[in-house]
Amino acid sequence: MEPKIELQKKVTENGEEKKKDGNKCKKKQLGGVRTMPFILANEICDRFAGAGFYANMITYLTQVLNLPLVKASNTLTNFGGTSSFTPLVGAFIADSFAGRYWTIVVASIIYVLGMCSITLSAVLPKLRPPPCPTQVNCQEASTLQLWVLYIALLLTSLGTGGIRPCVVTFAADQFDMTKAQTDSGSWNFFNWYYFCMGMASLTALTVVVYIQDNVSWGWGLGVPTIVMGISIVAFVLGSRLYRKIKPGGSPFVRVTQVITAAVKKRNAVMPKDPQLLYENKELDAAISINGRLLHSNQFKWLDHAAIVTGSDINESNQPNLWRLATVHRIEELKSIIRMLPIWAATILLVASHSHLGSFTIQQARSMDRHLSPSFQIPPASMSIFSTLTVLIGLPLYERLFVPVARRFTGNPVGITCLQRMGIGFVINILATIASGFIEIRRKTAAAQHNLLDQPTAVIPITVFWLLPQYCLHGLAEVFMSVGHLEFLYDQSPESMRSTAAALFWIAIAMGNYISTLMVSLVHQYTGKNRNWLPDRNLNRGRLENYYWLVTAIQVINLIYYVICAWHYTYKPINEQIETESSDEDLESADQNGKVSNFLEADDKVNKELELVKN
């Protein structure tokens, strides 16, 4: 009987859509540069909305809702921290069952709902207290008004949880991000991704903040809301072009299985030859598309999970994953464990510069911001100088710093991501030191003009004194933030990259919470007279002492980071190259549930392992 010929369609993990009709095999390339306008449109609009939404929020809380400075600052940092914790939930959903595409779509809708809520609170008079232009004896927002604010911020935090860990990894999925390709390429995806985000932030910090300060808060919050709605439409329009990696199951379950198996077999005898440990390429096919992780000698107690015993595999040759784990799955857990000490060092770095969104804006508000007799810079727009430094610094890093560094290091990318992060740590310390000296200069000018007891007065000192700290923080971001994001993507297991991206934001969350704790403790224990961080009059505070405290913490943190980076071991991986498949290969792949066939690039791996050892 002649077999029935059916049209079969299969999307391979490298982004090729294969169609088989009889003996014909057609390929349609998915992903690539052509998807970037749709993906980056979503992320650019999100960043535009987020930057415009939060950049001037300290002003909205203190000037419109009449909250005290410390309470307003802690409210922002708390919700900023929540927004950075929710990506862990979003990453779990994306990596486990929903996939990155649908996680982004649903999260974007929730984000827009939150923005609509807070826009309504700015438009309706019943949702805000009476104006208080003198900032003396002001009526604070009522409990109901605050709850409207909190619900809106909570919705945006939930939406952010799905967007942040998925967009950058979804964009990177559209390209070949193997080590061979990234080392030989003339561009760095993460540099240019961050550049696009900087452009969006710059636009928001100039246009949106100006509208908020000079037109109305209704329009100032409404414009980002409209733009975010447009971003959803742009993202969905490109859906047919995307390379969509299927989720490989919950990474948290796999990690739990490895730990459980290792504990159960803690007394098993370890074989002398690690090649005798359990491996199953077919089982790991969905989570090792770009290559299998090789066995490493770190954390050997986890290797007990790969020791094969009589009851580990059933009659149908299927392993009991709660008793037996493959080497690849064990190395996934090892990779995460190796990354955590490096990741932890970034937490205090975030805590050290969280003041840029609160205290520094209050400093700018008290200084002369005029560019002309009729125009002055909004205080929140001062952060455009950090953004401009990032926009200028990233191309210079790519085109100038990398070629020069390559001559000395012999590294195709100039310096490693760990070295890049280390430079960022040092620059950030210099930025905090500059902040302390600038605050001393600002208060000296206030004292000379007898303005220390006038919190709303404009001190006759140009706001451009704040420029050095903004530029140094921007330069630190060029090295630190981009290097950190690249490190997490490159060193994490490929099936956990959304989770790794979530770690980037969780570090920001924990940094914000630590900053809140530091600010609260300093405010509580530095006395009522000459409090370091006063509620209303910053001129009578000692903000510079807070900066010296932060500087000391950063120095200790830098020493910790150097020790961790010195002992870090890069993950060993056996990268794979896809080859052309015959019809018989495709049929075999269909029968075995595989998506595409790969050829292991052993020569390349051996060279990379030698580089890792050196």
Image (cartoon, rainbow, N blue to C red):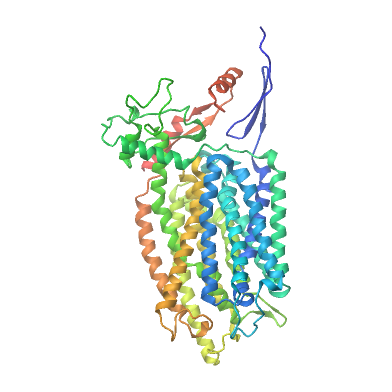
Q: Is residue 173 left or right of residue 319?
A: right
| Closer to us: 47 or 150 | 150
Residue 95 x/y as whole percent: 53, 42
In the image, what residue occupies the spot 30% across and 39% down?
Answer: 301
| Closer to us: 560 or 304 | 304
In the image, what residue occupies the spot 65% across and 66% down?
Answer: 205
Q: Is residue 512 placed above or below 39 in the rendered structure?
A: below
Quadrant of the snapshot with the C terminus: top left
Q: Is residue 275 visible?
A: yes
Residue 492 x/y as whole percent: 46, 44
**Residue 605 lies in what quarter of the image?**
top left
- Give the mark count: 0
Q: Is residue 605 left or right of residue 307?
A: right
Residue 413 x/y as whole percent: 50, 48
Quadrant of the snapshot with the N terminus: top right
In the image, what residue occupies the spot 69% across and 73% down?
Answer: 126
Residue 461 x/y as whole percent: 58, 84
